[in-house]
Image (tube, rainbow, N blue to C red):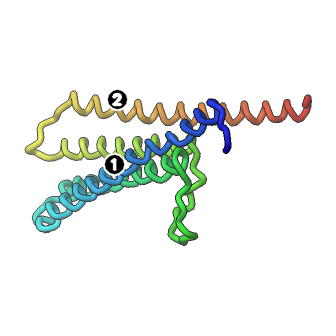
Amino acid sequence: MARFSIEELLEAGLFKSRWILAPFYLGLILALVMLLVAFINELVHTLPNVFTLDVEQIILSVLTLIDLSLAGNLVLIVIFSGYENFVSKIDTHGSEDRPAWMGTLDFSGLKMKLIGSIVAISAISLLRAFMSVLEPEVGLDERRLVWLVVLHFTFLMSGVLFAFMDWLAAVTEKHVRKEVRVHG
């Protein structure tokens, strides 16, 4: 009969607790379905009227579709890389359709993809807001536009700061490895 120490049991329990995250990723799959429904709803709403809509309305509809597509990509990135980084590797049985970044995206890479997607989504929302200003029936909501610009700038600066911190960490790590080789 094998005897396990309290430390071994605790560590085994801690390691297995990562599976508590699995329902979160299942919930994100449902969120992906919700985005798909919104995408289809936008298409169904726009397509029958495509010949009666003016150019700005079509562009706004296309921007909405792009926005939803980017949000879907973002959710999928979080599902795949989050699951692989924190729960378990995904075995795709050598499928040629496996995304090239799958299994190679660490937490730092995930963070950069997330902020990049958020900045892109924010930019599209800002562009959509500016495009809607051109519509005669929509009044100019300066306060909303200011907040959209402020939020977009905040997301953009967050991305720059994240990139700088990752660069700084890489330079520091490279320097430490060099020091260890020289003195170790």
Viewer-nearest residue: 59 or 160: 160
Amino acid residing under circle 1: Gly
Viewer-nearest residue: 120 or 109: 109
Q: Is residue 183 above or below residue 119?
A: above
Q: Quadrant of residue 8?
A: top right
Viewer-nearest residue: 17 or 176: 17
Disc on res. 156: none
Q: Residues within 10 Å of mark 1 (few under 14, many from 20)?
A: few
N-terminal label among 2 and 1: 1
CB within 8 Å, label 2 to label 1: no
Mark 2 secondary-structure assignment: helix
* Residue marked by disc 2: 150
Residue at far right of view: 183
Q: Report x, y in % for residue 154.
A: 41, 30
* Residue marked by disc 1: 27
Q: Quadrant of residue 156?
A: top left
Q: Residues within 10 Å of mark 2 (few under 14, many from 20)?
A: few
Q: Is residue 151 above or below residue 17?
A: above
Q: Report x, y in % for residue 165.
A: 60, 31
Q: Quadrant of residue 143?
A: top left
Amino acid residing under circle 2: Val
Report the Cα–Cα distance between label 2 and label 1.
31 Å
The quadrant the N terminus occupies is top right
Answer left or right for 81 relative to 145: right
Residue located 51% across and 47% down the image:
87
Residue located 28% across and 29% down the image:
147
Residue located 88% across and 35% down the image:
181
